Amino acid sequence: MKILHLFSNWKWTGPAEHALQLAHRLGLRGHQVLFAYGRPPKEDLEGIRQKAHALGVKTVELGLKRHLNLLTNTRDLWRLRGILKDFRPDVIHTHLANDHLLGGVASRYLFPSAKVLRTSYEGEGLGPSIRNKILIRYLTSGLITVSERGRGQCMKNFALPPERVWRVEVGVDTVRFDPQRRLSGVSQPPRTLRRSLGIGPSEVVVGIVARIQRHRRFEIFLDAFRQAASQMPNLRAIIVGRGTHMVPVAVEPARKMGLNGRVLFPGYKGGEEYVDALASMDMKVFLVPGTDGACRAVREAMAMGLPIIAARRGMLPEIVKAGEVGLVIDDSPENLSSAILKLARDEALRRDMGRSARKWALEHFSLDREAEQVEAIYKTLID
């Protein structure tokens, strides 16, 4: 098959990583894949361009603004006319609202034989806005959601039959996120961050990886950790991330609670340092889905064999099978404190849940499994 992916952004985001990894895996499965993305405002900015080059994915740069821009969209449609004529795709796979509009219009008026598929990365599903209703009703052959909750919501919002909406688990790189893998340039198994922060082998580490923003409920986590730490002297916390309001949101509240030295802020970690940060934790807390509604960070932590404490919010209970790979709670400080203590005090439970999390990730979150499922959807649309 010939698949044209449209992605209306140039930045390297969670959805961008998902879309590009999918395109890469589909190419490995023998399909002809072309990935069109937005042109960065400056040539030297790191984004999709560099990642696509590293993966060897064939690309084309268009204007493809994240938001509707009439002038840029008109120019892109003119460019797409030639691309569609030359490439002749069987499927146009769209990922965001503006590229969905472009792909839908291009298919309807320029190349009607191409089927238009949209992936929604919102865990709650696409909202019933007028724009979305027009896109789904008139410019879409099928829709992929990342959660069963989102699938049900989309069928309800747009009166879609079940055979036009699919739920596909978002894949993560289970080879990269492997607790047994030796990291590049590191002679020992990962946990370098843990050692560099002065955390001893007998201490138990609860971790968070998130952009430090007000809506991410850091006040709940810090209060819960304060309660748990008062009962368990060898408990430590690592908050990995950055944010404009990092000091008032997390650093200063931790200081006022007397948690200096117990709650550590190593900053943002990317690449191998991010994998090492996960390996330095004994459990991971996830309370609020961020801009990546597919909760990729949870999936990556599970692939690393970490037990998860997740809030009963959005699609999180779908990913975190309560009692098997972690704990799902109503996230009051008291509930979260109890969950942290339950895992912190029981090494065997952490180990068993971590193994189950890794096993679940291998079985359900692999990139190859995701590509196989999407490939089957393409065939259904074409047939």
Image (cartoon, grey):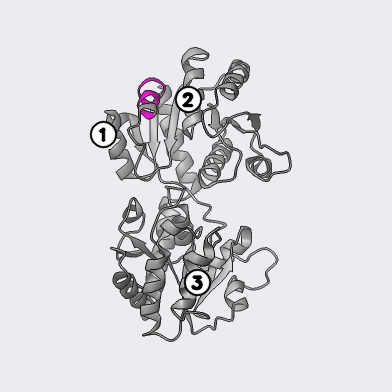
Residue 227 place in picture, x, y as percent: 36, 79
- Identify whether 165 is placed above or below 122: above
Could you give the CA–CA distance between mark 3 and mark 1, rounded to whole angstroms? 44 Å
Comparing 24 with 122, the one in front is 122
Dot 3 and dot 1 residues touching (CB under 8 Å):
no
Q: Which mark is residue 204?
A: none
Name the residue carrying label 3: 252
Residue at screen point 52% across, 60% down: 245
Q: Is 137 covered by the magenta stretch?
A: yes
Q: Is residue 111 left or right of residue 315?
A: right
The mark lying in front, picked from 3 and 1, is 3
> Which stretch did the figure color magenta?
132-139
Q: In which quarter of the image is residue 17?
A: top right
Residue 146 place in picture, x, y as percent: 39, 43
**Quadrant for the C terminus in the image:** top left
Tag 2, which secondary structure?
helix
- Identify whether 273 is placed above or below 45: below
Residue at screen point 38% across, 20% down: 138
Packing grade of label 3 (10 A; few <14, some 14-19, many >=20) is some
Which numbered disc flags the more N-terminal residue, 2 or 1?
2
Q: Is 50 covered by the magenta stretch?
A: no
Could you give the CA–CA distance between mark 3 and mark 2, rounded to whole angstroms? 44 Å
Residue at screen point 42% across, 33% down: 376
The mark lying in front, picked from 3 and 2, is 3
Q: Residue 156 carries which label?
A: 1
